[in-house]
Image (spheres, helix red, strand yellow):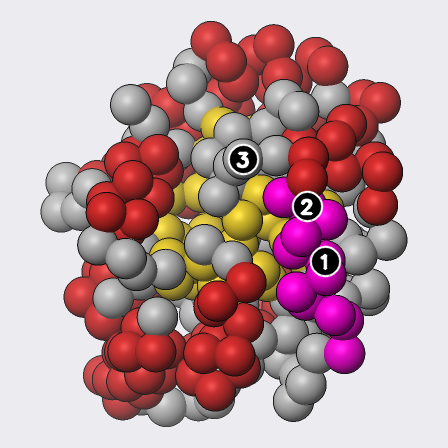
Amino acid sequence: MNRIDKKFEALKGGGRKALITFITAGDPDIETTYDIVLTLEEAGADIIELGIPYSDPLADGPTIQASSQRALNKGVKIPDIMKIVEKIRLKSDIPLVYLVYYNSIFKYGIQKFLKESKDAGIDGLIIPDLPIEERKDILEEVDKYDIYLIPLVAPTSKERIKLITENGKGFVYCVSITGVTGAREDIETDIEEYMKMVSQYTNMPKAIGFGISTPEMAKKLKDFSDGIIVGSALVERIAKGYNKSEMLQEVKSFVSSLKEVL
């Protein structure tokens, strides 16, 4: 069984919701990514998304775009990220997911990327720029490696939710708003209605992401989903210019405060 399935099964058995955290691999540097992942797990993260830096991340707001650029400026490349995942796997069995733009996979070579991801210990992929109409080729390949292609839906997806989710696995990434990623003070979408709509089309666990920046917001949204995804608010803390130990402590404290409400 894929680690993502095991995690959601265990959480459901304990009446808890998943805390899914996002960081950009290689920000502020590739070795610190290793320390951040282990800190996130220690603080209570259940699943970790590792963003593969990309020069034109269309779905991301300024915070994650900047983190991607910092990693690229450090010369971080896909093989470096694969190696750090291998190193993480020597210490941790936490589910790990790549958030990666399709052009990065295509240029690297689909087979090569998937084989190395599997060998390193990756459990799933989120590909924000992959249209339904173009995912047939990669769907056939991910199944060979038991890597889950995690579907993304948005409030505007409506009747397309059935098509988007029917071949997905792991969980449904439910984008809470229209627009790009970024910490927000409030989410105006009618989340209850939105989650009911998604549930009409799939029984997969549903996780809400985009804009969640505080424990209060996580607490407010948790009853409508199986998990909460936090990215920009975490990346902001990593970027604040603390020394490494202070940054890791800040990350740990923030993630622990989110976990407490879930």
Q: Is residue 109 above or below residue 19?
A: above
Residue 191: x and y in percent read 68, 66
Secondary element under disc 2, as helix, strand or loop, is: helix
Which of pointers 3 and 1 lies earlier in the amino acid sequence? Answer: 1
Boundaries of the magenta span: 188-199
Residue 89: x and y in percent read 21, 40
The answer to whether residue 179 is seen in the rendering is yes
User: Looking at the picture, which amino acid does disc 3 mark?
Assistant: Asn
User: Looking at the picture, which amino acid does disc 1 mark?
Assistant: Tyr
Label placed on residue 194: 1
**Tag 2: Cα neighbours inside 10 Å, few (<14), some, or many (≥20)?**
many
Q: Which residue in the protein does label 2 denote?
A: 198
Q: Is residue 201 left or right of residue 41?
A: right
**Residue depicted at x 45% and y 54%:** 226
Q: Which quarter of the figure has residue 95?
A: top left
Q: Which residue in the protein does label 3 denote?
A: 203
Q: Is residue 179 left or right of residue 150?
A: right
**Residue depicted at x 48% and y 67%:** 223
Q: Are the residues tagged 1 and 2 within 8 Å (C-beta)?
A: yes
**Tag 1: Cα neighbours inside 10 Å, few (<14), some, or many (≥20)?**
some
